[in-house]
Image (tube, rainbow, N blue to C red):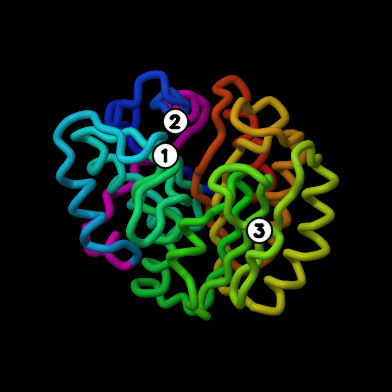
Amino acid sequence: MELISHHDFVRLHPTGDHPEGSERLGVLQDAFDWREGPAARRADIERCHSPTLVDLVASIEQPTLLTLDTIASNSTYEAALLAAGCAMEAARVGGFAFGRPPGHHATHSEAMGFCFFNNVAVAARFSQVELGTERIAIVDWDVHHGNGTEDVFADDPSVFFVSLHQWPLYPGTGGPGDQRDGVLNIPLPPGSTDQDYLRVFDDMVVPAVAEFGPELVLVSAGFDAHEEDPLAGMLVTEAGFRELARRSAALAPRTAAVLEGGYNLETLPRLVAAALEGFS
């Protein structure tokens, strides 16, 4: 699986000692061979987001908090365009995009949860508009519910969204009652293990996605469900991520992945390596 990133991710969008820092990309870029992806255009972003949100991110001139946990500065817009563009390129070639800021909490009109533009959503719309892909499944195994992705594709029958996540946990959505056509939310209790994840994947995700019949699966690949991640309480191991990736890749003829969470700098490279083995 080809890896897509950009050298400027370690320079742009500084966040100080925030968990979503440039060091995340630094350790991954040091650990793997990758090539640079392009920046998205504003028009690419506006397939998923309101012009008001794009204007807001583009207009930031000094460090500010857009929400209590979402730091922005005058280089955030450039970084967010690069992250979305790398996700688009990953979708085009069947690769894995390493970018920051992450994206799956960004709704149509709001930045939140460390996220500004929804990278996996932008990649999905790019695939439909420019690559002719008609049916896409997005499988999100970040430890947090992908509320932004669910929002962007609300009532869109061409995209099926699956989220496996710890619940209750930020952002407080994706609970047992949050289900509708085109959405499969699988809230899991703290302490869930590899076996718990793989059981619900086999019992719930596989048949639901098979019935939908996607041409492409895009994975929101978060690694913060790992047993040593500081921001959550799950017990997934390297072997678990390998199997999640393998099962995700078996859901459709084509697969691509986009980095979301994962905040332990010591474990992140080997977790990504395990996922790459599974995708391959």
Name which residue type carries label 1: Phe
Q: Nearer the viewer, residue 29 or 74?
A: 74
Q: Secondary structure at mark 1?
A: loop
Mark 3 vs mark 2, CA separation in Å = 27 Å
Q: Earlier in the sequence, mark 1 or mark 3?
A: 1
Image x and y of residue 265, in percent? 55, 22
Q: Nearer the viewer, mark 1 or mark 3?
A: 1
Please give left or right for residue 45 compared with residue 274 in the image: left
Q: Earlier in the sequence, mark 1 or mark 2?
A: 2
User: Residue 253: x and y, percent?
Assistant: 62, 69
Q: Amino acid at mark 3?
A: Ala
Q: Nearer the viewer, residue 139 or 93?
A: 139
Tag 2 secondary structure = loop
Q: Is residue 68 above or below residue 41?
A: above
**Looking at the image, is mark 3 or mark 2 earlier in the sequence?**
2
Instruction: Find residue 232 and report its image quarter.
Output: top right
Q: Magenta span covers which residues?
A: 24-47
Where residue 98 is drawn, which disc sits there? none
Query: Image point 75% across, 39% down: which residue?
Result: 190
In the image, residue 102 lies at what x, y percent? 43, 43
According to the image, label 3 marks what residue? 249
Instruction: Give the percent coordinates (x, y) of residue 266.
Output: 59, 20
Choose top left, top right, bottom left or bottom right for residue 276.
Answer: top right
Magenta stretch contains residue 27: yes
Residue that carries the numbered disc 1 in the rendered image? 114
Q: Are marks 1 and 2 in contact (CB under 8 Å)?
A: yes
Residue beneath label 2, please?
20
Tell me the crowding category of disc 1: few under 14, some 14 to 19, or many 20 or more residues within 10 angstroms, Cα based. many
